Image (spheres, helix red, strand yellow):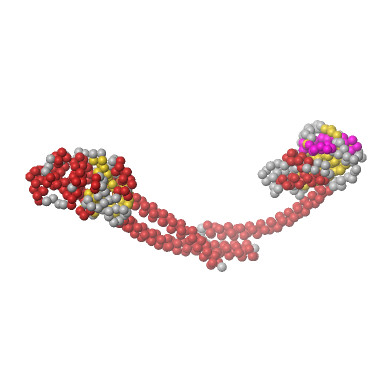
Amino acid sequence: MANKKNGKLTFQVLAVMVPIIIIMTSVILFIVHKSTVDGYLKAKNELISDKLSSTEFGAWYMPPIDKTALWYFNYYEAHPDVLKESITEEEQQKANEVLGEDASTFILFENEQLDTLDPITQTYAAKKFYELICNLASSTTIESDLDCAFLVVTQGQNNGKLLYSIENGKLNKEDTMIKMYDLSEHRELEEAISENNGTLIFERTRHFMFSGDYYIGYKPIVLDGKTVAVMGLAYNWSSFSDVMSKTFKSAFILAMTDVILAGAALVVLLYRRVLRPVGRIEHSLTEYMESKDSAAVKGSMEKVKVNNEIGRLSDKVSDLAVEIDHYMDENIKLVMDKQQIETELEVAKDIQASQLPDDFPDREEFDIYASMTPAKEVGGDFYDFFFVDDDHLAMVIADVSGKGVPAALFMMMSKMLINDYTLSGLSPHEILEHVNNALCRSNSRKMFVTVWLGILEISTGRLVSANAGHEYPIVRQPDGSFEAIKGKHDFVLGILKDKKYSQQEMTLQKGAALFVYTDGVPEAINADEELFGLERTVEALNKAPDAKPRELLENVGNAVFKFAGDAPQFDDITMLAVKLNKDL
């Protein structure tokens, strides 16, 4: 099993490294190949450009003898066969008689002088001029290591015919004024000819007069404002390309051999320095998972002798096994402690629930119902209702700052204080003042509680209430809709000693309903972090405004939980509702 895993890891490493090395090697070879080719092309093109523009090679069509050259081109147009013939003895003798010692140089005289010559001497001059430009082209190809030179006529009935073509330094007279060069296959060249500007043009083409793949430089010859011919120099790209391809293949084979050797060395190194130590670590961890014996792991890891990250990892594995043993012992203690805490919290939850009244009075004058859903095991909200006397019902809903056990304890103390002071016969604002001072005396943690307290006179519906920083009560009069009663908010209880509180008074008619709640209702949020809000609370109540208190609470609770969806509940949700019966 271990050998299979080692082999798999080796393959994975090689599967990553070998392609990377091959790609990098190929890229480097490609860059070298491309830079070599580009350099070769650039040098050759610069050479052709220099030759086509040089006075040595191209002086015969430049001022001041360009008109003389035009005379010769016109002569060749009229007498194309002259170009295939060599100078005869008669022509040489006649030229010597007429021109004397200047016979060989008279060909560069002005065209007016050439017009005055007799036909035989003109033929001599035309042949001599053709011999000159052919020799210049031939010597240029030999000296510059170019493969061929040519001159194509671009006017008259001989348009496209070769005036001369030289391959490997030799003139091919069989092509002279016979072989055609299709200028229409070279769009840029055609444009340069039509524009008569002598623009130098380069192209690579396989459609050429000679076999092979050629790079060609063209120079249109403009005489008297018109392109009369195109001169070209070319070199064979195929031979250079073949050499470069062979060199590239040899370099690639050599590089791949190096990759294979490097891969083999890498496998050996990986096995000795990584795979074998990792296998020992894996084996030790497997045994530890079964035996939980950290001493055995430590002894096994001391045998890993490699001085690298793997060696340091083996030391860490040994230390980790010891730490895990220690952690497991501590975790067992924590689990036991947690179970004890959970048991105590469950007891606290039961105690808290027992402090909230769940025995709703059966009175014909009214119905009342309340509920609390804590956000944690124990919460800080509470509600209460009790009779001050047979005709007065006290109702309380409150929210302690914070959550958990501290809030629950503060809640129980607040609830008992409110209950005691209410039963003593004080008015709502006096009750809150006494409770506030009592909480301030023993509140080192600066906790506070918001409270709504109301005392309902059952026989008349007169409701006297006080609000210490709590939510607005929501009231519905008979045949109306629920509406929030936005009265005065006084400060919370437990912070400011000797704080004075106010109270409000209203009358609930027969059939009216009162709904009070904690901030867990309007401040419930959904996944988009939107608040449920007071407006949605009122809407939920008005879906069945004439419902009994229990159904009112269920409607609001269902609306809150549907709105929140999967969003967690961060606050206690506490509600209380009372409804006066119409029939009495």
- Residue occupying image coordinates x 61% and y 65%: 287
- Residue occupying image coordinates x 86% and y 39%: 511
Count of marks placed on residues: 0
- Foreground of the two, 290 or 166: 166
Q: Position of residue 37 (x, y in %)?
A: 34, 52
User: Is residue 186 located in the magenta-colored stretch of the structure?
Assistant: no
Q: Position of residue 548 (x, y in %)?
A: 84, 44
- Foreground of the two, 230 or 323: 230
- Snapshot quadrant of residue 102: top left
Q: Position of residue 500 (x, y in %)?
A: 80, 31
Quarter of the image for the N terminus: give it: bottom right
Q: Position of residue 440 (x, y in %)?
A: 79, 37
Identify the magenta region. 458-483
Seen in the image, is 76 located left or right of residue 317? left
Quarter of the image for the C terminus: give it: top right
Q: Is residue 151 visible?
A: no
- Foreground of the two, 34 or 48: 48
- Snapshot quadrant of residue 67: top left
- Residue occupying image coordinates x 84% and y 33%: 506
- Residue occupying image coordinates x 30% and y 56%: 212
